[in-house]
Image (cartoon, rainbow, N blue to C red):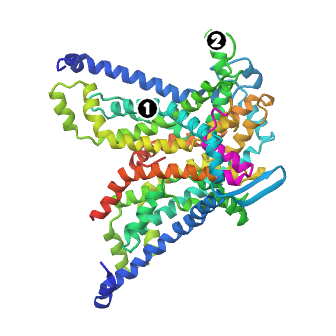
Amino acid sequence: MKPKGNVVKYGKRNSIVKYNKWGYIFLIPFVVVYVVFQLIPLASTIYNSFYENFMSGLKQIGPTFIGGQNYATLFEKGDLWTYLSNTLIMWIIGFVPQIFFSLLLGAWFSDTRLRLKAAGFFKTVIYLPNLIMASAFSMLFFTLFADTGPINSILINMGVIKEAYSFMSHVGSVRSLVGFMNFVMWFGNTTILLMAGMLGIDPGLFEAAEIDGATSTQRFFMITLPILKPILLYVMVTSLIGGLQMFDVPQILTNGTGDPMRSSMTLIMALNKHLFSKNYGMAGALSVIIFIITAALSLLVFNFSGNKEAVGKKGGK
Amino acid sequence: MPNYDSGLDQGLGIKNRRIIAYVVLILLSFLCLCWFYVLFINATRSNGELTKGFSPIPSTHLFENWNNLIHGTQPVLSGMINSVIVAGLSAFLSTYFSTMTAYAIHAYDFKLKRFMFTFILMIMMIPTQVTALGFVQLIDKMKINDTFIPLVVPTIAAPVTFFYMKQYMDSTLSLSLIEAARIDGAGELRIFNTIAFPLMKPAIAVQAIFTFVTSWNNYFVPALVLQTDKKKTLPILIAQLRSADFLKFDMGQVYCMIAFSILPVIVVYLLLSRYIVGGVALGGVKE
């Protein structure tokens, strides 16, 4: 539909076209701010990744063009793999119980036969940790799990352990604490998303299954889970994207060191370190790698959710 | 297979399942809340009491801890004020301009409409961290580092808020209403400000809360931008508390400070939780 030809013929069209320029005007703030504060920084981040540019003591080295050298260093020295696997391990430690309990609670909350009382109260409580400042939550865990902290004192009083267990100096306990905090902070959010999906399932399906004598477990695995697959996939990929950005919790818990032995150093923590030490070349390369991974995952989400639902609806209009 | 405890599932089963559900829910609720209980209890106890070990009964040193905290080395009060300013302005700018962007796509027909909508959906997931390097260099060049501008102004372009507003508009804002206002001779900007924007109030409230909380909790970008002590926001002060030598501190103060920085969010949440929990399911797109 090219309005140009019609403008001359009909006055009415003209006025609509006149209004429609306001569509562009109202988009100006978003576009200008996005270009200035996101697009230009993204471009200069990519640009920086091809340059050698860091401080050696007080001396500025570069910027000199070195092509893919920064990337090569990241891949070859193996740091990238360490940080990536740290991030993924801590994400998985949190994600497995998160998806398990979210599915369970979602099924319970949406089960009309179970008729749980105080469901609103429970939903409010489990969503609460999601809004808590991650850095404060992490600081709280650091004090609670300190060698002289309350957890150790409770465990000693109960006779579980004889002397204080140093949670902060063991790889397993630090990673578990980070994963656990992520679990506590995010399972409420996931429960609510999954529950919304489960409430959308036609109740007739459950009734039919019940008449056929299916148990609640069978109903869950044969009906709920298959129908929920797209939402589950969406939750999983978006959680992975969020997991790759993991920063506040391990940063505060380990004071930015990723101790013990950098075993809890995530990708963004490494990026943060490079940014503060003004090693812009390496920071750029690391940013670009994280960007590419997230962009690929985003496209995946976009293809099976946003595209079909939001844009598809638009097209049908 | 068909006879697999089907009798039990109908009779005893539902009762048992309900009991199991309650037990699991109570345990998980405990898991969510116990940390905050310990936190608030410990914030009322003196350093001496805290080193003796944990006790679940509150003590009487809350005001003492509070007093020591605000007269201590950390600029806690200015941190609180800075956090309120940054989060408040972000919430306002983000909701106002996201509604405007959504309105542009919703109410008008223009050539780039579909492209813009698809574009905003695609950039929704890109994390701000990956552009941080360019961002820091840019604000250095613009001479706006160590100010609130780089923390507040970028929230005008918030794809997630935009998407939520667009979804809400599709279900509530009819084009005939806008048409009627046009016939009455109202200008486009006026129609947006006096008709469309007020109609979006429920959605704006939900997104304002989310933006406020996100900004309140934000640590990564403010830590890169703010350098002067008096300008720092609460998350940065928490990080400084962590990097200072832990044992030298009065632990009562440490707990008091953590409690102080999360209490406002807890209060707001408890007052508005119904809208917030409903809003999560509606939006469907949060990290």
Give the amino acid at mark 1. Answer: Phe
Q: Position of residue A298 (x, y in %)?
A: 45, 51
Among numbered discs 2 and 1, the one appearing first in the sequence: 1
Q: Nearer the viewer, residue A232 or A110?
A: A232
Specify the quadrant of the image occupied by residue A109: top left
* Chain ID, mark 1: A
Q: Amino acid at mark 2?
A: Ile
Instruction: Give the extent of the magenta segment.
Output: A262-283
Does A277 lie within the magenta span? yes
Q: Residue B230: image x %, image y %?
A: 77, 51
Residue at the image position 53 percent from the left and 59 percent from the top: B94
3D distance between C-alphas at marks 2 and 1: 33 Å
User: Considering the numbered disc 2 on the image, is that residue within a helix, a strand or a loop?
Assistant: loop
Q: To which residue does mark 2 refer?
A: A161
Check disc 1: other Cα within 10 Å, few if <14, some if 14-19, many if 20+.
Answer: some
Report if residue B118 lies within the magenta region.
no
Residue A6 place in picture, x, y as percent: 29, 86
Left or right side of A7 for A97: right
